[in-house]
Image: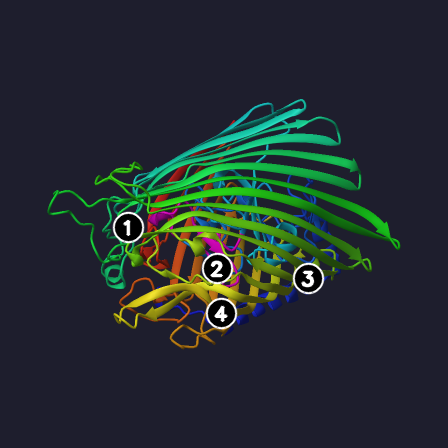
Amino acid sequence: MCWNRIKLTFKTVALINLLLFISVINAFAQKGADTLTSLEKDTITLNEVEVTGTKTKNGIGNLSETVGTVIYSGKKNEVLMLDSIDANKAQNNPRQILGRIPGMNFSETEGGGFPSNGFGLRGLNPTQSIEMNTRQNGYNITSDIYGYNESYYNPAMEAVQRVEVVRGAASLQFGPQFGGTVNFVMKDAPKDKKFQYTTQQTGGSFNLFNSFHSIGGTVKKWSYYSYGQYKNTQGWRPNSAYTAFTGFAKIGYQATDKLKFGLEYSVLRNYIQMPGGLTDAEFNKDSRQSFRTRNWLNSPWNIITGTAEYKMTKNTTITVKSAYLLSQRNLVWRNEDGGPGVADSISPVTNQYVQREVQRESFTSSTTEARLLSNYKFLGMNNSFAGGVRYFSGKMKRQGGGPGSTGSDFDMNLYGGDYEYSLDFTTTNLGLFFENIFRVTKNWSVTPGFRYEYINSTINGYITDDDNGGAIVTRKESRNRNIPLLGIGSQYKVSKTTNIYANWSQAYRPMDYSSLTPIGVTSKIDPKMKDAYGYNADMGWRGTFGNFLNFDLGVFYLEYNRRIGLISQTDPNTGNTYTLRTNTGNSVSKGIETYVEINPIKMFTQNSKVGNISLFNSFAYVDARYVSGTADDGTSIKGNHVEYAPQTINRFGATYGLRKFSVTYQFSSTGKSYGDANNTVSSSDALIGIIPAYRVMDLSATYLIKNFNLKAGVNNLTDARYFTKRTDEYPGPGIIPAQGRSFYFSFGAKF
């Protein structure tokens, strides 16, 4: 079979989903009301400490109306239970782990030099998850929530219990990002053991070695959990070696029945070799080749967090989380001079490689967030109020263009000069927010909300103007913003296990440091860029029937004004093409997001002797287009597709389980997208052009033997050659190929 000929159009997939859903409903109806009652008794309800309100144990479910001190009523959300998913967790493969989230688009660049893969939703840029609010155990893990919110650190998926995803409606509770929130919830200490040890050892293609160890336990009022993960690989492409250590430690103290404290520490140490970018011709000839042997990056990350939870009454809870971050992003590389098509050169005078550039970024920030949730009665109905305050203070120092060594190893020293630019940034943020669930009837609730954001950002330092004879330009600026945001949601319970939800929430994105002073960028920067603003709206029907059907069918509308992107330009003096980073225009993303998962055997019997089969389909149709915008040369981009916004993202999976064995096959199909707002199809410039559609298959299996497990799998089963990113900066410039076929085998134990 030629998989390249498989084309699942929007109408075809939507029809398949509809027919599948209708057939299941009909089969269910024929079983009668008595069967419904019986199956409802089998629905698993987990206690609050483990996972509140998860509707299914087959990998994905939804959060309850309130969890902890957060309101989720009326919001489109998903929760993934990682222990019930067959996936390559040793390599944090996002396609397998988060692939069930409808519309989740991935920037698969980890093998190209970024510390972690990025993700985005609803046509938003997935690079380093810049449009998302990324959290761990409910607190911020990015360097700067507004100034530089790229994700360099993600926890080891082998230590993650679940992943919570909330779409754009999260802007009121967590911050005004358009994309919503992703929260990695770490595993907790076992409550019935004083000591528990787990280990997972993984080997695979390209000399992959991953060693994971964790310990945890509960002793009287004290609890603890800690893990360490060491990972090393030579990489799929030459010059893409990667070594990393990720660790986490948590201590909890239950002072009283109402009061508990916690202390957490997260650490990342890594060294990443970057193979560089490719032109279209080079990618088409051999996507595994590399022309950069001396490019390195490391990003040491440290996060210390203190937590407290106090149950004032049985109906009122207060939580406080205070996180302190001290991290860096360091880069030494043969820069972008000449573009991706020019090989690293040797000087005829010194008979050595030319000097590399050294660039450093250091981050220091603190975030304190206090939340309160109170349940109360009003007009005879149970209502819920959630409110809180967040204070953030962050500093970033960015230095670049320093003369580096002529060697090939990781060397951050300067040789013969100073940095071409040195800039100090600060961000101060105060956020106040509240939401309230008003239960109008037993089944219908309305949740209005409000958020106020104060942001102060400053820049101070110097930049060398190469276009003006190397003149030193001093920059000293300060800007204040006062941003009110409104939102309202509603939820109607159709039955005990299904509900209809709807939400409208405003969103906002201030210009970040990367937009104003990006590092190692071949594009020109528009100094008149402005902040982006807009809103998210969605509506859907979700729930479960018994334990054999899980579904979420929804539509959405996202308005994004003054979005920042790339416009291709032509220099009138030289005739050369270049890209300009600017406010490209206003855009609208609209479409559907559907998830359907069925277990056909459990429709008829709960005690199958031949095992069980679970089938899921995660599908999104995203029509993300500019509704206004004009390039400097007068070319209109109205009607053009938004960059990095494929129209269709479709994933189908099948899991077969028999006793202690399970195997999962997943097929992922992602439509084409564009690298610039002009929707350039092809160009001599590798920074702009089409990003072709691609299809990838993965296979994973698990076998349990008492306290031991065996895992194995194949990533990219058919060795598809594709890419998800064209970049005008590191780790390029140019096309960053995604990884081809690889195998892995893993052995684990728990004592």
Location of the N terminus by quadrant is bottom left
Q: CA distance from mark 2 to mark 3?
A: 25 Å
Query: What is the number of the mark on residue 585?
Result: 4
Q: Which residue is mark 1?
A: 335
Q: Which residue is mark 2?
A: 652
Magenta range: 109-132
Instruction: Let me know if residue 305 is in the magenta part.
Output: no
Q: Nearer the viewer, residue 718 or 502?
A: 502
The disc labelled 4 sits on which kind of residue? Gly
**Image x and y of residue 49, in percent:** 67, 38
Q: CA distance from mark 4 to mark 3?
A: 31 Å
| Mark 2 or mark 3, earlier in chain | 3
Which residue lies at the image location 51% right of the left edge and 55% below the top edge?
131
**Image x and y of residue 364, in percent:** 50, 38
Q: Secondary structure at mark 4?
A: strand
Which residue lies at the image location 71% right of the left edge and 48% below the top edge?
66
The disc labelled 1 sits on which kind of residue? Asn
Q: Secondary structure at mark 2?
A: strand
| Mark 1 or mark 4, earlier in chain | 1
| Mark 3 or mark 1, earlier in chain | 1
| Type of secondary structure dominating the magenta stretch | loop
Mark in the foreground, 4 or 2: 4
| Mark 2 or mark 1, earlier in chain | 1
Q: CA distance from mark 3 to mark 1?
A: 49 Å
Query: What is the number of the mark on residue 501?
Result: 3
Question: Are the residues tagged 4 and 3 within 8 Å (C-beta)?
Answer: no
**Image x and y of residue 685, in percent:** 29, 65
**Image x and y of residue 427, in percent:** 54, 47
| As drawn, 44 above or below 504 | above
